[in-house]
Every structure is written in C-alpha cells, then in structure tokens.
Image (cartoon, rainbow, N blue to C red):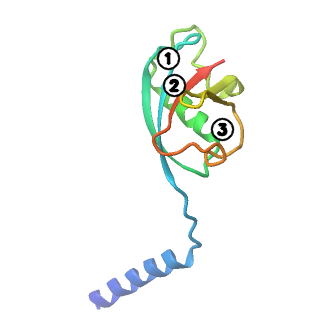
C-alpha cells in the first residue's frame, strides 16, 4: 500500500507540472553597482538573477531594496531613497551609455542581456 501511495503522489506532481502552460523566459544575470552621485557610497556591488520579461521598474525596485538592506547607503539624514523616491532612480548602462528610468518596459525590450553591467543612480 505504501508503494501505491508514492506512485499516486508522483503522478499527481507530474500531472500538475504538465498541465501548467509553459512560459519560457531567459534568466538574466545583472551585475549592478551603485555610484556616488549624491549620498551613495561608491562601488557597492550586487549580482541579481531576473527574467528577460521583468520590467525596468521591477529591476530598480529589487536593486534598491538590496542596496537599502546593506545599510551602507544611509549617509544622509533621510532614509535611503527607495519606494518614496523611485521616480528619481535611474539605471545607467556604461557600455551603451543608455539611461533607463522607472518604466514598465521589459529588459528584453532594451536588449539587456546576460552579464549586463548597470549602475543604479539617484538623479
């Protein structure tokens, strides 16, 4: 009886896996740094795995949260600008000299690929 129940559980898992529609997106590894432009400590680095269907807005939020948690960014009397000042945040691609603002376009739309190096600025 124990063997039968294991087979039923395994079958249920396989059924659940194959009944879901598959959405294939590329996993991108973004190498980001924060730069000292106002209150920020320079050369704070993070590597983040995201999907090519994720938006610039999502990426900025994720990076902002990670940098905020590091607490090294709290040089100013105000809290590190994250959700409250998200419109002032910008990503900069040094290779293409492109600036990405807090927008809903996807990483794929901007041809941001695996290994892209970006800087997060507070402008």
Mark 1 or 2, nearer chain start: 2
**What is the distance, in whole Å, between disc 3 and disc 2 at their CAs?**
16 Å
For numbered disc 1, what is the local secondary structure?
A: loop
* Quarter of the image with the C terminus in it: top right
Foreground label between 3 and 2 = 3
Q: Residue at x 43, y 31 (%)?
A: 46
Q: Badge 3, how many Cα within 10 Å: few under 14, some, many 20+?
A: many
Q: Are marks 3 and 1 in contact (CB under 8 Å)?
A: no
Q: Badge 1, how many Cα within 10 Å: few under 14, some, many 20+?
A: some
Residue at the disc numbered 3:
57
Q: Are marks 3 and 2 in contact (CB under 8 Å)?
A: no
* Quarter of the image with the N terminus in it: bottom left
Q: Badge 2, how many Cα within 10 Å: few under 14, some, many 20+?
A: some
In the image, taking residue 19 as reference, residue 105 lies left or right, namely right
Q: Are marks 1 and 2 in contact (CB under 8 Å)?
A: yes
User: Looking at the picture, does residue 31 appear above or below residue 17?
Assistant: above
Residue at the disc numbered 2:
68
Residue 6 percent across, percent down from the top left: 33, 83
Q: Residue at x 62, y 49 (%)?
A: 108
In the image, taking residue 77 as reference, residue 42 lies left or right, namely left
For numbered disc 3, what is the local secondary structure?
A: helix
Residue at the disc numbered 1:
73
Foreground label between 3 and 1 = 3
Quick one: 18 or 2, which is closer to the camera?
18
Residue 66 percent across, percent down from the top left: 49, 31
Quick one: 53 or 74, which is closer to the camera?
53
């Amino acid at each position: 009886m124990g063997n039968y129940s294991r087979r039923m559980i395994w079958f249920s898992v396989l059924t659940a896996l194959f009944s879901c529609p598959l959405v294939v997106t590329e996993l991108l590894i973004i190498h980001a740094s924060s730069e000292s432009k106002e209150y920020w400590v320079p050369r704070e680095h993070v590597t983040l795995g995201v999907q090519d269907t994720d938006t610039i807005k999502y990426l900025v939020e994720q990076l902002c949260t990670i940098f905020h948690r590091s607490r090294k960014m709290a040089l100013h009397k105000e809290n590190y600008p994250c959700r409250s000042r998200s419109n002032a945040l910008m990503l900069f691609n040094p290779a293409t000299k492109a600036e990405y603002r807090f927008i809903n376009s996807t990483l794929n739309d901007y041809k941001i690929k695996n290994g892209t190096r970006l800087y997060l600025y507070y402008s």
